[in-house]
Amino acid sequence: MSNRNRETLSGAEIVVRLLERQGIRALAGIPGGAILPIYDALSQSTQIHHVLARHEQGGGFMAQGMARATGLPAVCMASSGPGATNLLTAIADAKLDSIPLVAITGQVPRSLIGTDAFQEVDTYGLSIPVTKHNFLVDSAESLLEIIPRAFRIAASGRPGPVLVDIPKDVQNQRVEVDEWPAPGRAVEPPPADPTLVEQAAAMINEAARPILYLGGGVVHSGAAPAAVELAEKASLPTVMTLMALGAMPVDHPLSLGMLGMHGARCTNLALDECDLLIAVGARFDDRATGKVAGFCPQARIVHIDIDPSELDKIKAAHVGIAGDVLTVLEKLLPAVDRRSRATWLSRVGHLKASHPLRMPGIDDPRTPYGLIRAVADCLDDQATIATDVGQHQMWVAQAYPLRRPRQWLTSGGLGTMGFGVPAAIGAALAEPERTVVCFTGDGSILMNVQELVTAAEEDVNVKIVLMNNASLGLVLQQQTLFYGERIYASQFKGMPDFVRVAEGFGIAALDLDRETDPLSALSAALTARGPMLIHASIAISEQVLPMVPPGAANKEMIGG
Amino acid sequence: MNALTRNEREAVARTVLELAVNNHPGVMSHVVGLFSRRAYNVEGILVMPVGDGATSRIWLQVNEDERLDQMVKQIEKLEDVLTVRRHGAEHEVFVRLEEFFR
């Protein structure tokens, strides 16, 4: 991949050329003084479509939407100072959910760094704890090494965000380039220890009541089909974390759906009885495990993860395998016996029948579960489902029939309200042939509502389903259940007219409350192309159940 | 620094970590940040470049703690950290320095 034509280029032009060579065709950002040279170079690119976000956090989440939908690193840009600080939430969100992101920020010229110059902030220092790695670039020449390396780091091993901070004078510095580096690609991880894989297989073969526990790493590593194959071969009832939803179709006979705080009773009860937990690309997050001492108390643990620091972090594994999940599963599959496990599957079947997820109102589109089911009935598995954060997110996680890896885009680790709309825009830009539905709430949508105009401008095929209960519903639910019903600061007194808000931003809107036949109105809205907001009021009394009280063991669920 | 008396400090089990790192301005922040954001005190730090200066060696003196295994794994994940070795408290690197801290 070398090009012997010697050229004299600015740092900014080098950045743009390297992004083009990397295969970037769309990126999101907002220009400002310290990144103007890069924007000037970007204006000359015929390959890269720049999406002008209206807030840097929105731009960061658009890039996340692209990365989550495709699995490839995506790019966002911001200027120095507030541009960079506004990006930080989207970067931190990518860190916690292991999303490959390359954030490029402008910085004041090197001669002004450390002088409290206009729009100067220590972007490098601020981004250390929320990035996988970061760079402060000190010469245009070094961009030739740093930009491909940023992509390599973002995509390799456990994916994550990388920030590249480029001072303005470095962007303007002109250097001779006579050879271009290869684009940065994911590096093959070191192979897993074959003895450990054998031990894991033996433990699975010996287990009477095993459960397969899938996490987001299964999606990241493209291992969903292998995980399903393992479950089927060894007859393993399977639970998924919030991040893994879609890895196994939720209506697969072995699927127990989502575990943890808002999992079905049968799911958490089955975990309580298992004698072997096979954790694959999962990190024993507290929302999944509940009180750790009470999580799978009888189980031995096989833990497979690409990140060695996840092994033994929360729960000690009897066999901990550091390695790429797909590669390890492919090694594990032939060593695992085909088993029917009739007794255990019958016990799990009994739990499912006696403690299923209860979805009251599933047939009434004016209830949360009913609305989600009605939306799902209008779409096929090719649709992408994004959410914001809160009650609506948990209802969708429980009730939407997710069947495809990367079908599901949600902010899991950081739980960032405001994620949904821009992430859905990014997903729609990356995969324009799909319908992207964003379920949101009246609290969440306002946290990045400005991106509605970006959706209008880009004419993306995003359908925003706004479940409006005029409150911060999950806060209100916790105050109701755990704070003596002292409802405080969780009910909105002022409520925007969301239909007019959407129309004001240039987006068509539908108010399901006013429709006499909501199902046919919904169907028409979801099959039309282009952005649309679908507003639906829901009762403030609706709760997400069951619920494990924070700090309690999973078997101590309330409701449901 | 913590508020232990000298006698108490000596009673706490210590570990010495030896890190080989790329020598550039951000590397200390990356390493020390892992400890500070977990409220895990670093008792002693010593850094000098090695050889031609492309890499440095960082010596860290830390208290033994149930989090230490996780800390070492986190350090190993840093891009600019090349290797991490663990030594016992008897390692002489900090002992020899004691005369500068009297």
Image (cartoon, grey):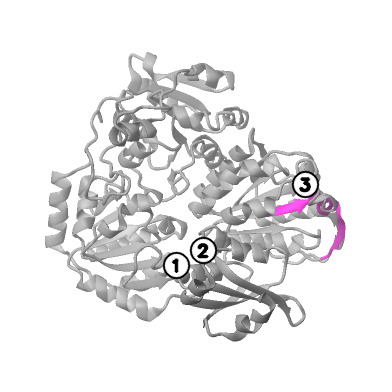
What crowding class fits label 2: few (fewer than 14 Cα within 10 Å), some (14-19), or many (20 or more)? some
Residue displayed at 28% across by 59% down = A293
Q: Are marks 3 and 2 on the same chain?
A: no
Q: Amino acid at mark 3?
A: Ile
Circle 3 sits in a helix, a strand or a loop, which is it? helix
Who is closer to the viewer here, A395 or A177?
A395
Mark seen at residue B67: 1
Q: Up-down: is B46 above or below A287?
A: below
Whichever of labels 2 and 1 marks the residue nearer the N terminus, that label is 2
Does residue A167 show up magenta in the picture? yes
Residue A184 visible to an observer of this rendering: no
Q: Position of residue A253 (x, y in %)?
A: 23, 52
Q: Up-down: is B79 above or below A255?
A: below
Residue A209 visible to an observer of this rendering: yes
**Apparent side of residue A475 relative to residue B54 in the rendered image (left or right):** left
Chain letter for mark 3, please: A
* Number of numbered markers: 3
Q: Position of residue A120 (x, y in %)?
A: 75, 45
Residue displayed at 39% across by 59% down = A282
Which residue carries the number 2 mark?
B40
Q: Up-down: is A366 above or below A414?
A: above
| Image quarter of residue A134 | bottom right
Chain letter for mark 1, please: B
**Apparent side of residue A113 relative to residue A302 in the rendered image (left or right):** right
Which residue carries the number 3 mark?
A38
Q: Position of residue A475 (x, y in %)?
A: 38, 34
Q: Are marks 3 and 1 in contact (CB under 8 Å)?
A: no
Residue displayed at 22% across by 50% down = A555
